[in-house]
Image: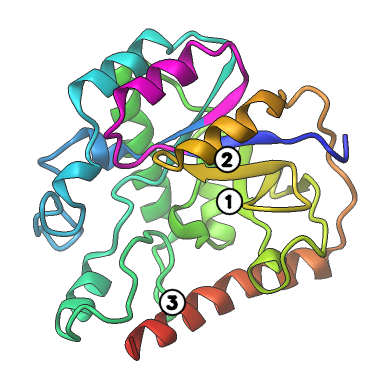
Amino acid sequence: MANDYLLAIHFHAMGDEGLAKRLFNSRKVFLASIVPNLLDRTMKTEEGEDIYERIHPVETYYPEWAKEIFRENKNNFKIIWGQEGYRHCCGKCFDKQQTNDGKGYDPYHEHVCLDGNSQSLDEQIEIIRKGKKLINEELGINPSVYIPPNHLYNKNTLRAAKENGFDLFLTRNGFDYFIPNLIELPPYLEEDLFILPETKKGKSPVRMTYYGENQKILDLLPSSTSLIGFRKEDVSPFKIWVNEKLIFKYKKLRDVVNLFR
């Protein structure tokens, strides 16, 4: 299965209805990552502040035609449904960004902040539960893959996902942030979850794209395959630890660079 991959499409800012129809009518397997907050324009931050038109732009939210396409495909066995957090943003980091002329402090994470603060296990269990419930109530979909926003998570996130009935968890091949397509990170088991590393270019079982990257999606879609052939491999705890550290280091470096732009 070394050359096989599952295409993961992160559905944000769905401005092209034609592409969505083409994807869901393609009869190809892919992972559809849904952000619960983008279904609810009334949702607030943990501090009680508005998210709509403040943190997430208007065009990011799902239009009615997109919701209807999701609903129509809720039982499409070719689609692997994923849940991407709940709010998919951090109010505290957004406020820091605003007081710093919009520089640094990427606010599009949820469970773990780069300043070292993180939600407790109980908090993570609750917000993942809320997100899963919202997707089910709005779309009739029961997602099977959990995706931590911005790929930032800790052990409690893994445990909270498992507590909410997830068996699959999407992470990032952090090695690719620094040396793309060099170090392979295959599927592995952690906290009783089947971990699926994703990458934009190289040696991991999942290729990631964002809705709107039309040509990339259309180029990758024909070769996307199901999870049936994927098997977990023995990945050393040290390699897993290094990968998780690299994800954090890259995100921190990105914020530092953005401070000086």
- Count the marks: how many? 3
Task: Pick the residue in front: 9 or 92.
Answer: 9
Q: Give the magenta part as a residue range.
A: 10-31
- Describe the element under mark 3 as helix, strand or loop: loop
Q: Residue at x 61, y 17 (%)?
A: 28
* Residue 176 visible from this viewpoint: yes
Mark identifier at residue 162: 2
Q: Which mark is residue 158?
A: 1
Along the polypeptide, which appears first: circle 1 or circle 3?
A: 3
Give yes or no for residue 20 being in the magenta stretch: yes
SS at mark 1 in the image: helix
Say which of marks 2 and 3 sits in front. 3
Q: Which residue is mark 3?
A: 114
Q: How is the image coloured?
A: rainbow
Give, as a three-letter code, the residue at label 1.
Leu
**Which residue occupies the foreground of this view, 145 or 133?**
145
Residue located 34% across and 41% down the image: 12
Residue 209's x, y, as percent?
Answer: 52, 44
Compared across the picture, whether 188 is left or right of 104 comes to right
Type of the residue with mark 3: Leu
Whole-Å distance between the Cαs marked 1 and 2?
Answer: 6 Å
* Comes first in the chain, label 2 or label 3: 3
Q: Nearer the viewer, mark 1 or mark 3?
A: 3
